[in-house]
Amino acid sequence: MDNLAYQDPPRVERIEGRTVLMSPRPRVAHNRVVFNLGRLLGNYLFGKTCVPFADGTDVFLDEENRYIPDAMIVCDRSKIKPDGVHGAPDLVVEVLSPSTMKNDRGAKMRHYAAAGVKEYWLITPLGKTVEVYYLENGRLELHETYACYTDEELAEMEPDDRAAAPQDIPVSLYEDFYISLRDLFWDVDAFQ
């Protein structure tokens, strides 16, 4: 019999005033990507002004919209309160799953843009892709889609195709901040 005293409360988001129950636990591949990303963000940002968060921190955009992104970076520390982040993070990352994809690409993306999120990433763990959106004229516009390739796949590509397949994602908040796709998707295949 389960001990109910030790069960986590359900995770919920508010999307356009509706309470949306989140999946109880993501798949292992999803968790690996979030863990890897949190480690990469934390390693780079250690000792810097901007603060990384990975899974579990609420973002309060307004009364109608409270989200729990998979990862984010907040550079304005005054937005960080004991119960979460109040206002737009600078970068938000969502790891897509079938149950969240519609909201991550739709209502949440629109509200993040309206609040002023500068950069928005959508990660597909099984496809090993990252869509990077930048805020332009009040909308999050697709800037680039990155795909992780093995050494063998890169070796088989024509030189022009290989040059068009960067394996590092620039983080727009810092000129020298890049996320390696191989590091991001490290060990994800082992648990699919």
Image (cartoon, rainbow, N blue to C red):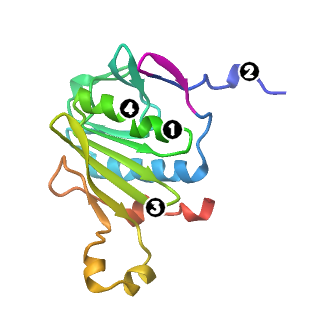
Relative to residue 184, is residue 62 drawn left or right?
left
* Few, some or many residues within 10 Å of mark 2 (<14, 14–19, 20+): few
Are the two marked residues, 4 and 1, in contact with CB atoms closer than 8 angstroms? no
Q: Inspect this view and state whether residue 133 appears.
A: yes
Relative to residue 96, is residue 131 drawn left or right?
left
The residue lying at 45 percent from left, 83 percent from top is 152
Q: Secondary structure at mark 1?
A: loop
136 in relation to 146, above or below:
above
Amino acid type assigned to the residue bearing label 1 in the image: Thr
Q: Along the line of sight, which residue is nearer the eye, 182 or 64?
A: 64
Real-space Cα separation, disc 3 to disc 4, in angstroms: 22 Å
Residue hosting label 4? 108
Residue hosting label 3? 128
The residue lying at 48 percent from left, 41 percent from top is 101
Residue hosting label 1? 100
- Magenta stretch, overall SS: strand
Are the two marked residues, 1 and 3, in contact with CB atoms closer than 8 angstroms? no
Sooner in the amino-acid sequence: mark 1 or mark 3: 1
Residue 2 location in percent, x, y?
A: 79, 27
Amino acid type assigned to the residue bearing label 2 in the image: Leu
Are the two marked residues, 3 and 4, in contact with CB atoms closer than 8 angstroms? no
Amino acid type assigned to the residue bearing label 3 in the image: Lys
Which residue occupies the extreme top position in the image? Answer: 63
Residue hosting label 2? 4
